[in-house]
Image (spheres, rainbow, N blue to C red):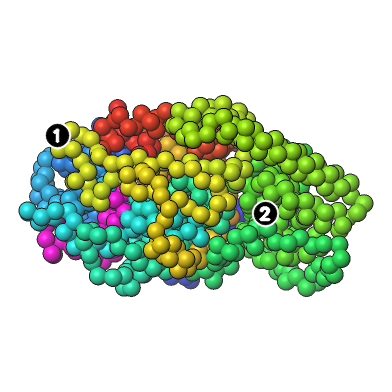
């Protein structure tokens, strides 16, 4: 096998290099080699829980695996023989969502967080000599200071004294075992606990330009292993936040809501920064092993990779004002003087034999992608081929080939029409226009992309520019006429609706829209499933927001005699392009904003955010709120995520290419955690088991088990089904399960979202 076939080099070469290179470096590269990943297969199904397994984590040595479940138990497993060592009855009264080994404690201390808003610490050294049967163990420390569910725990490498907990109450708290083993102290309220490191109860943003106002229900947090002062959090909006713990204010209580502290960086793909979708939120955030990158997993969206520092090659730092500039740059007009395209001689073309072979392979891949575009078949693999050419490891391919590949990929994305493909096509068109400002294809595909986004006027400008660049090309002329017809039809439809709205408003003067009106209108106007597929959110002018607000502390909002959470329901409507945001009081009444709030909004300076540098597509994340995306291996060269279809997916980090797809659960895979040193990966989900995967398959394959037969149909069918779920699920304004949640006891645990693994 030729060495360039593997982007991480040939295994034989790596083994040989251990004589020259340092042993740790070679071992890190060998841990998760591509040839090993393609042979991953199920080795062991570890039974011991009675319900969904929501959390798994390795100890630092990789000798033990810990798991937490809806059955409120913590299980500890031996990696060498997969045996269950301990099964601890924790005393939690609700689902365990997170559990960790506390570092530098000889693996004697473990910590858990659950839906009962509690954090519990256990000393498992007390279990030495006891059998693996279920054991009720008293917690060594018990923290009850959160008022909503605890969704994630974080520990610092080398620190055995502190654990951090992120909760849906909008706070991230720091628990120091040296200061006390219970919180709040006896006789005090939750609000008196002075352990709040981050108060984000007024920290959620609807868009990058908006000032933070609503509670940011935290879903995930992580501490960098290489820079422990860096803290990453994500929650109920589209933005992950990076904080420097050294710059945060002192620990405080939650007696009064604090203004969110400034963060070092926001992370959000540019096309998601202005969505204003109340349902868009993060389910998992994590640092790469070297701390230079972060991985974001969105509910109803894809997984995205970003640089911690924006000076990386593939990342961009942007502000709210940059969004229209980056996405819709003024097109090249006929009278504009066009600079000539870069000559091939100026390209830094490869010279060595290896580089020339790589260049030949890239040219062949571009030809294959062009054929896929012409045939209209195998669009997915055409895009994967372009990904390898543009982002793969190897020498520079030259500007001419890069421009051609960008245009082909943009056209393939526009034809495939999976979720957010159109935004990726816009990026490619802008990159192609940067290389060649007079590119006909870049302008033509840009007009097509803007047309799919509903930006008809901007699309017309690009179509006219493309026609001016290639007057003899009939496609551009037809595009111009098509857009003009659409603009005329849209104007006529707008006039008709305006007249109908005036007539209806006269007949129903003063009548308020009820929730029933909303649901009936939504049902009557909802398009078919086929129309949803590939449709973008930006096509819609109105959006409804539904919030359930409770007091700051969960105690005064909860009925002591019943499992009911007291609060208020707020229903708001607004237009996407409306910069004026209605303010709602806590009792749901509407009123004009106060002068102080107006002054606060006018003085707010929007922050900048770091854009994505890679997207990982294929899985589906809408069914649960705890789905992880993880870096695999000590080098983090691969990315993995669970999916709602019971599979889990592995991508090459550099190119975003799908490498492996495995069936890991009967329903949903939520957790994927790689062994610290070996080529072994643990997964869990809705099943009551933990599964261990190792490279046992005899034949390398893209699907599970290393089958040697055809696999293309299986992979494409699974991915297309997931794309349909992504495009359909979040468009339901108020699904039945959402309203049903108001009558379910679990609602009292602190959420309106029905997307949790819950016991039946």
Q: Residue furthest right?
A: 472
Tag 1's secondary structure? Answer: loop
Residue 95: quarter of image: top left
Residue at the location (60% across, 64% down)?
A: 322
Residue ID for mark 1: 561
Residue at the location (74% across, 38% down)?
A: 492
Give the side of residue 381 with respect to residue 69, left or right: right
Q: Residue furthest left?
A: 187
Q: Residues within 10 Å of mark 2 (few under 14, many from 20)?
A: many
**Residue 184 location (% of width, % of height):** 13, 55
Tag 2's secondary structure? Answer: helix
Residue 170: quarter of image: bottom left
**Residue 270 location (% of width, % of height):** 56, 57
Alpha carbons under labels 1 and 2: distance apart: 56 Å
Q: Residues within 10 Å of mark 1 (few under 14, many from 20)?
A: few
Which region is colored magenta?
154-183
Give the side of residue 97 with respect to residue 276, left or right: left
Q: Nearer the viewer, residue 542 or 413?
A: 542
Q: Which one is closest to the eye, mark 1 or mark 2?
A: 1
Give the side of residue 144 with respect to residue 299, left or right: left
Residue ID for mark 2: 426
**Which sits earlier in the primary sequence, circle 1 or circle 2?**
2
Kindly tell me whether residue 629 is visible in this rendering. Answer: no
């Amino acid at each position: 096998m030729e060495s360039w076939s593997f982007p991480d080099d040939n295994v034989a070469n790596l083994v040989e290099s251990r004589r020259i290179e340092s042993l740790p470096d070679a071992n890190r590269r060998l841990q998760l080699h591509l040839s090993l990943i393609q042979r991953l297969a199920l080795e062991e199904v570890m039974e011991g829980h009675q319900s969904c397994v929501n959390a798994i984590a390795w100890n630092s040595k990789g000798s033990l695996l810990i798991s937490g479940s809806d059955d409120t138990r913590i299980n500890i497993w031996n990696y060498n023989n997969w045996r269950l060592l301990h099964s601890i009855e924790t005393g939690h009264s609700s689902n365990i969502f997170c559990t960790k080994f506390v570092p530098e404690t000889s693996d004697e201390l473990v910590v858990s967080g659950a839906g009962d808003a509690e954090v519990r610490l256990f000393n498992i050294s007390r279990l030495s000599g006891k059998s693996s049967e279920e054991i009720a163990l008293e917690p060594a420390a018990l923290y009850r200071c959160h008022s909503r569910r605890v969704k994630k725990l974080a520990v610092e490498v080398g620190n055995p004294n502190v654990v951090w907990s992120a909760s849906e109450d909008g706070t991230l708290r720091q628990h120091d075992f040296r200061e006390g083993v219970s919180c709040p102290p006896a006789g005090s309220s939750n609000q008196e606990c002075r352990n709040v490191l981050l108060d984000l109860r007024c920290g959620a943003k609807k868009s990058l330009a908006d000032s933070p106002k609503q509670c940011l229900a935290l879903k995930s947090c992580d501490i960098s292993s290489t820079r422990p002062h860096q803290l990453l959090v994500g929650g109920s909006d589209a933005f992950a936040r990076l904080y420097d713990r050294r710059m945060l204010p002192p620990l405080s209580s939650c007696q009064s809501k604090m203004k969110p502290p400034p963060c070092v960086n926001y992370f959000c793909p540019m096309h998601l920064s202005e969505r204003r979708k109340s349902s868009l939120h993060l389910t998992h955030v994590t640092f790469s092993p070297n701390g230079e990158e972060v991985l974001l997993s969105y509910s109803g969206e894809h997984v995205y990779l970003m640089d911690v520092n924006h000076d990386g090659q593939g990342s961009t730092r942007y502000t709210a004002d940059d969004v229209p500039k980056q996405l819709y740059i003024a097109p090249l007009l006929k009278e504009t003087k066009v600079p000539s395209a870069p000559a091939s001689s100026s390209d830094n073309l490869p010279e060595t034999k290896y580089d020339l072979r790589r260049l030949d392979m890239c040219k062949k891949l571009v030809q294959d992608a062009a054929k896929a575009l012409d045939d209209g078949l195998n669009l997915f693999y055409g895009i994967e081929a372009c990904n390898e050419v543009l982002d793969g490891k190897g020498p520079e391919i030259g500007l001419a080939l890069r421009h051609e590949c960008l245009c082909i990929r943009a056209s393939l994305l526009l034809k495939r029409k999976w979720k957010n493909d159109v935004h990726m096509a816009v990026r490619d068109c802008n990159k192609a226009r940067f290389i060649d400002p007079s590119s006909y294809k870049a302008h033509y595909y840009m007009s097509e992309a803007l047309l799919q986004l509903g930006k008809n006027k901007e699309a017309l400008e690009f179509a006219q520019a493309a026609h001016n660049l290639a007057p003899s090309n009939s496609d551009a002329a037809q595009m111009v006429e098509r857009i003009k017809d659409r603009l005329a039809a849209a104007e006529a439809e707008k006039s008709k609706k305006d007249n109908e709205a005036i007539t209806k408003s006269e007949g129903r003067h003063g009548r308020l829209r009820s929730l029933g009106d909303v649901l009936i209108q939504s049902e009557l106007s909802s398009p078919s499933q086929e129309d949803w597929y590939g449709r973008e959110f930006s096509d819609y002018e109105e959006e409804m927001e539904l919030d359930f607000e409770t007091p700051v502390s969960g105690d005064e909002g909860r009925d002591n005699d019943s499992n009911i959470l007291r609060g208020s329901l707020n229903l708001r409507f607004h237009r996407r392009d409306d910069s004026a945001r209605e303010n709602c009081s806590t009792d749901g009444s509407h009123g004009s904003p106060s002068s102080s709030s107006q002054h606060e909004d006018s003085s707010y300076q929007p922050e900048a955010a770091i854009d994505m540098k890679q997207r990982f597509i294929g899985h589906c994340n809408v069914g649960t709120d705890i789905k992880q995306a993880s870096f695999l291996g000590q080098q983090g060269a691969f990315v993995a995520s669970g999916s709602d279809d019971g599979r889990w997916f592995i991508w090459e980090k550099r190119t975003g290419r799908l490498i492996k797809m495995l069936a890991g659960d009967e329903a949903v895979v939520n957790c994927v955690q790689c062994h610290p040193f070996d080529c072994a990966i643990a997964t869990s989900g809705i099943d009551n088991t933990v599964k261990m995967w190792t490279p046992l398959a005899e034949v390398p394959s893209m699907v599970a088990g290393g089958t040697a037969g055809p696999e293309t149909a299986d992979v494409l069918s699974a991915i297309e089904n997931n794309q349909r779920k992504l495009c359909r699920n979040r468009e339901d304004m108020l699904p039945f399960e959402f309203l049903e949640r108001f009558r379910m006891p679990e609602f009292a645990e602190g959420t309106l979202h029905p997307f949790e693994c819950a016991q039946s």
